[in-house]
Amino acid sequence: MEDDRAPVKDSAQPGLLERLRRELRLRHYSPRTERAYVTWTRRFATFHQRHPQELGAKAVEQFLNSLVSERGLSASSHQQALCALVFLYTSVLNVPAPWVEKLARPKRSQHLPVVLTREEARTVLARMQGPTQLMASLLYGSGLRLLECARLRVKDLDFERKQIVVRQGKGRKDRVTLLPTPLVQTLREHLQFVQRQHRNDLATGAGYVELPGAILAKYPSAARDWAWQWVFPATRCYRHPATGRLRRHHLHETVLQRAFKAAVREEGLAKLATCHSLRHSFATHLLESGCDIRTIQELLGHRDVATTMIYTHVLNRGPFGVRSPLE
């Protein structure tokens, strides 16, 4: 379901959590980040049974250590919890936190990505059908992230130039990636069905979608315009609690995740492949074809080419085209 980001009273620290939400929204943090920071703040206050205003560096360190020692928290979650508490103290409670630099920060492990072969990717995609097959094909054919694919709007597809504009991807950055030629006709036919569905929604007083930022205030009719509709809409409408309008959200990402997992299981693959493995496979197969790594970096939307370089380690020839003497 869509997060309307309305303030919610919380029994633990209602005033504090509402202030936290307000500060996060003023800085345009994503809804997911907001939910995560609120959760960590609530857990921190519950752990000590005191208001965070009364706590300091030692309390934060005790809380983080308990997460690692007792709950086996991963490095990425540990880092997220630390960032949430730093934001709480510096931006909400306005408490200087020079002690933050002294806190032990977890070191993330470097894991090689799970990559499918071309044949494995082809057979897994062949076992899928309908919109989820088309979405999975875009992950593999365009290098999209799962949510980037789910949040595509009609206006983001450029069939003439065969490119996809990814809006507000990871790091809130826009980028352009390729639209595979084999998917053009399938996408056109899919959009014809979506457009008929949208016209039926309009006829029944529905047809609204969520709009980013202040678009709705600037263009009140945009919420029902065809260009702003989701490429992969949900099967059902819901009533927006604030406006009472019937909206249609994009297809939830878990629908694609379940369909892809079922296809991998039916194919009998021993690899622990996920939807994100299709994006890894996209980058690896481009490298195998001789594509320039800087181009792949742009297509993937990586900030640093060092992130893209990880795919050289899953190639048979190694990062510098080196071959074993045994070969």
Image: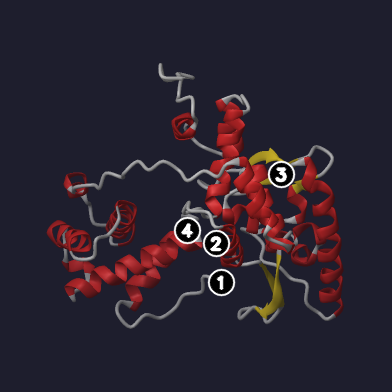
Q: Which mark is residue 267?
A: none
Q: Which mark is residue 4?
A: 1
| Position of residue 226 in the picture relative to residue 327 (left or right) | right
Mark 3 / mark 1, whichever is N-terminal: 1
What's the amino acid at mark 2? Arg
Residue 214 appearing in the image: yes
Between the C-alphas of marks 1 and 2, the distance is 35 Å
Q: Residues within 10 Å of mark 2 (few under 14, many from 20)?
A: some
Examine the image and state in which quarter residue 200 appears.
Answer: bottom right
What's the amino acid at mark 3? Ile
Residue 152 appearing in the image: no
**Residue on which disc 2 sits:** 265
Between the C-alphas of marks 4 and 1, the distance is 15 Å
Q: Residue at x 63, y 44 (%)?
A: 119
What's the amino acid at mark 1? Asp
Classify the position of the N terminus by image quarter: bottom right
**Residue on which disc 3 sits:** 164
**As displayed, is residue 81 above or below residue 168?**
below
Q: Which mark is residue 26?
A: 4
